[in-house]
Amino acid sequence: MSLQETPSGNRIHIGFFGRRNSGKSSLLNAFCGQSVSIVSAQAGTTTDPVSKPMEIHGLGPCVLIDTAGFDDTGELGRSRVDSTERAAEKTEIALLLCGGGEGETGLSMDLEAAWHARFGEQKIPVIPVVSKGDLTADARAAAKAVADCLGETPVIVSARTGAGLDELRERLLRALPEGYGNRSITGELAQAGDMVLLVMPQDIQAPAGRLILPQVQTIRELLDKKCMVISVTTDGLEDALAALQAPPKLIITDSQAFRTVSEKKPPESLLTSFSVLFAAQKGDIAYYKDSAAAIGRLTAQSRVLIAECCTHAPLEEDIGRVKLPRMLRQRCGAGLTVEIVSGTDFPADLAGYDLIIQCGACMFNRRYVMARIARARSQGVPMTNYGVAIAWLAGILDSVSI
């Protein structure tokens, strides 16, 4: 997979945060070397987050996120601040631009200090930036004021002259979370020389002529690990097993085929699903597994939230919108309420739900998925995953390799 094809969920997300007119858009454009965000002297020009995939030498594939000012006011302004807060949930390194408003950097830093503390509490690296360095009367004095307030030395930059951009890139390299990008999909389940059998139903869920993203990423990782990979559809499973001289070390299937594959697999072979693998890579698999027990407590009066990461037109026999709700209602009663959200739509108030079921989240980064899990945990709502839930419903969760 080329750099340009690297999925957003596998890129380090770098967010630009600050007041209106603090220079976020200008700095992002200077950093990219092209016009990505609209720049204007009018405060509040950026209304919704703007994302730019690119490569930064040393960091690799990234997504730069320009956000609306967190000092916006009024009803529309509150909506813009909400969008900035949602962007913060995806951010893995934050650039905090200090200034804006009246144009005097460090004049009033109550909001900057609050956001700096917020990222610190969430263990997100944050780099303070004194923007518009060429326009600030005394950039060094402003930088000292920022350092005194935040307890961290800022980078002085000028989007117009490019001054400070190299230092900012160096700070980003140093801020890269330890071990970032090294989280494996298959972990210890597959090693060099292992035979891995992929069981991949090619139904309406799979685009014609293509494989879905989790399948592509898993195959690529297995090849990089020097595993031997065999791919079949569900109806070819028995023939594939018969053709092998020895049972495969690992079988990875689509979650909806869990029961069928479990009944036919050799006892020596480990079994998991693409959804479970991505749940472990992107989320908290132990919490997902523990939360699956909540399915047994659901009744016809319960409410379940199903959270898809992809936004797509509903398909016949869609796993999240049709099959999973049907499985739940067959067990718990036809009156079970199932609500579905997609993309970045995720309620702030989860208290009314008895269970949340999240997809594999191949399109999201780990930071964003963990933010959702933290929200559910803080409100006492169990949260699990498609594959884990389906394995529990099939009665095979304890035999699934995680």
Image (cartoon, helix red, strand yellow):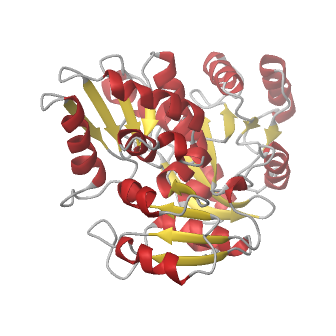
Is residue 286 something that shows in the picture? yes
Q: Quadrant of residue 35?
A: bottom right
Q: Residue shown at 56%/52% (left/top)?
A: 277
Q: Residue shown at 59%/61% (left/top)?
A: 269
Q: Residue 391 location, x and y as percent?
A: 42, 44
Indicate left or right for 377 with 258 as reference. right
Indicate left or right for 300 with 191 as reference. left
The vertical placement of 166 against 231, above or below, is above
The vertical placement of 277 against 330, above or below, is below
Is residue 25 something that shows in the picture? no
* Residue most extreme to the left: 334
The vertical placement of 205 against 359, above or below, is below
Q: Residue shown at 45%/56% (left/top)?
A: 262
Q: Residue 386 location, x and y as percent?
A: 40, 45
Q: Residue 388 location, x and y as percent?
A: 46, 42
Q: Quadrant of residue 208?
A: bottom left
Which sits in the foreground, 39 or 323? Answer: 323
Which sits in the foreground, 137 or 78? Answer: 78
Q: Quadrant of the N terminus?
A: bottom right
Give the mark count.
Answer: 0
Which sits in the foreground, 174 or 237? Answer: 237
Q: Residue 14 location, x and y as percent?
A: 64, 47
Q: Residue shown at 62%/81% (left/top)?
A: 245
